[in-house]
Amino acid sequence: EGHVQEKAAAVIAGLNEEKPVISCSQMKSFYKCPRNWLLSSRLNIEEQGEAAELINQYTSGNLYHKIIELFCEKIKKKGLYLKIDEEGLSSQFKSFLTDSIDEAIEYRDRNFCYLKKELLNTTKDAITKTAFRFVTKFCTVFNNCEVISSEGWYKKEYENYVLNGRIDCLLRDKENLQYYLVDFKNTGRAIPSNLYAEEKEADESEENMAVV
């Protein structure tokens, strides 16, 4: 307990000296509960849950993000475009996705306890069905799009703070060269009510900017 208090004091002192680095997710966490934000984001202390809660929405969300990241990286590496055939995903895309699922589970296994690993493996069939259903829809909506970036970090420095964040996926349409910034959500509650950003013509100040 004393070690945690000392580390917390050092972190708080550092926050007062350094230019703060913020992101949308960290701001949500901070305003919801500053204490939990400090413990999780700065002191790296995670809440211990019951066995039944080991594979929660946050864990599964990270897993699906990793699957899509690996799948998109394979598409980009081969210089291919997202596409969908009349029968659904091509055999090549199915192979990419199957490999991505295995790699993502193996990647998550590294930091999981034995029980968590076993729970994850028992749900692999359900994870596979969900991943194939999503990727099929993803390729249908963004057919003929090129993967520009997957899980890429961006950083913008302002006078009093630094804004950073991770972009889930950036695509470019092959036909009209239009860019699409895609944010993946794994629950209905995570989907914002306004799916599209509306730019204000008159007022472009930072105080009136919104993240959607």
Image: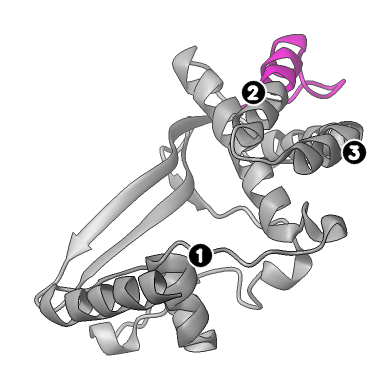
Mark 1 / mark 3, whichever is N-terminal: 1
Residue 103 tag number = 2
Mark 2 / mark 1, whichever is N-terminal: 1
Residue 45 tag number = 1
- Residue at horizontal 43%, vertical 67%? 41
Disc 2 on helix, strand or loop? Answer: helix
Q: Which residue is mark 3?
A: 126
Q: CA distance from mark 2 to mark 3?
A: 16 Å
Q: Is residue 202 visible?
A: no
Nearest-to-viewer mark from 1 and 3: 1
Q: Is residue 22 visible?
A: yes
Amino acid type shown at disc 3: Ala
Left or right: residue 118 compared with residue 28: right
Q: Determine crowd level at label 1: few under 14, some 14-19, many 20+ residues with C-alpha closer than 10 A.
A: few
Mark 2 / mark 3, whichever is N-terminal: 2
Is residue 30 inside the magenta stretch? no
- The figure's colour scheme reads one colour
Measuring from the top left, give residue 198's x and y in whole percent.
46, 76
Left or right: residue 71 compared with residue 52: left
Disc 3 on helix, strand or loop? Answer: helix
- Are the residues at dot 2 and dot 1 in contact (C-beta closer than 8 Å)? no
Measuring from the top left, give residue 173's x and y in whole percent.
49, 36
Residue 137 falls in image quadrant: top right
- Are the residues at dot 1 and dot 3 in contact (C-beta closer than 8 Å)? no
Disc 1 on helix, strand or loop? Answer: loop
Q: CA distance from mark 2 to mark 1?
A: 27 Å
